[in-house]
Amino acid sequence: MLCIDPNGAYLPAKNKFLDPAGDRLRAIFLLATLKHKRSGQEFSHTQVLTEVVIECLRGYNVQCAIVRLADHDIPPGTKSNMGGGDDWPGILKKILESDIIIFATPIWWGNQSSLMQRVIERLDELHNELLETGKSRLTNKVGGIVITGEEDGEQHITGNISNFFSNMGLLIPPHCAISYQGSYTRATRKSLGKKFREEEGTADAVEKMAKNLAFFARLLKANNIPE
């Protein structure tokens, strides 16, 4: 990967907004795989690509966390809190504490997964706040997208999520999305991760995504958008 040297050490950044010694940023990945962690199902390909992005982000002093949505109780609705047993308020708190928000989803029938759509619906109350007050609690944060699948639909999903980010007040940096579409026949978690790290096109896209997310997140942190 371009963000590390042949010995596995991250290359130093020359720009102050990319300096690994600069202020630590927080990134949250909302992983919308439909595979439950403890169900014995096949590993999540979307999570494997997410982990490769995280490796690169860490080189820019970004602390990363993954929230596996399938392992949480997130009832349907458009409110930030749907009552007892709702795990969403805790997830929302982590989102609001983050500088970088990444939606990671597989492709299902040409669209983002149902869990990714659930996140969009549960954030609707924040959009209502924006319409009523002109202010968004997601302003001065940046958004990114991770997509995997064996079928077409990547551009459609990227468009859907980018439109949502824009209307919620999130900044969308250049090259902030990474996708991989292809067959995973007989792949293991380890072999797929190796493929993502060594395939030049994928590795280059991951590096651009991580660099731009870190740069613009740190830029906004130092220079908030005026209200």
Image (cartoon, rainbow, N blue to C red):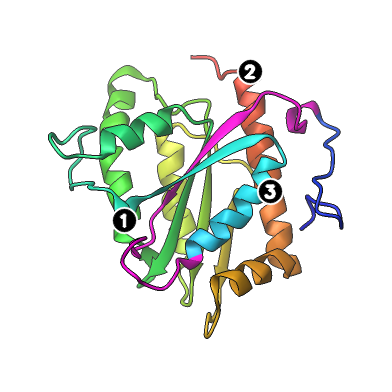
Which label sits on residue 70?
A: 1
Which label sits on residue 56?
A: 3
Q: Viewed as shown, does residue 188 lie left or right of 131?
A: right
- Which is in the foreground here, disc 3 or disc 2? 3
What residue sits 53% from the left and 80% below the top?
A: 184
Q: Residues within 10 Å of mark 1 (few under 14, many from 20)?
A: some
Q: Secondary structure at mark 3?
A: helix
Q: Secondary structure at mark 2?
A: loop
Q: Looking at the image, which is closer to me, 55 or 113?
A: 55
**Label 1 to label 3, Cα distance in Å?**
25 Å
Q: Which residues are magenta?
A: 16-45
What residue sits 66% from the left and 36% below the top?
A: 214
Q: Between disc 1 and disc 2, whose residue precedes?
A: 1
Q: Secondary structure at mark 1?
A: helix
What residue sits 60% from the left and 30% below the top?
A: 25
Instruction: Look at mark 2 in the image and give the residue it sits on.
Output: 223
- Residue 197: image x %, image y %? 70, 64
Q: Residues within 10 Å of mark 3 (few under 14, many from 20)?
A: many
Q: Viewed as shown, does residue 204 lie left or right of 108?
A: right
C-beta proximity under 8 Å, tags 1 and 2:
no
Residue projecting furthest to the top? 227
Query: Does 119 lie within the magenta span?
Result: no
Query: Does 17 lie within the magenta span?
Result: yes
C-beta proximity under 8 Å, tags 1 and 3:
no
- Which is in the foreground here, disc 1 or disc 2? 1
The kind of secondary structure the magenta stretch mainly shows is loop
* Circle 2: residue type: Asn
* Circle 1: residue type: Ala
The N terminus - image quarter: bottom right
Q: Between disc 1 and disc 3, whose residue precedes?
A: 3
Q: Is residue 199 above or below residue 93?
A: below
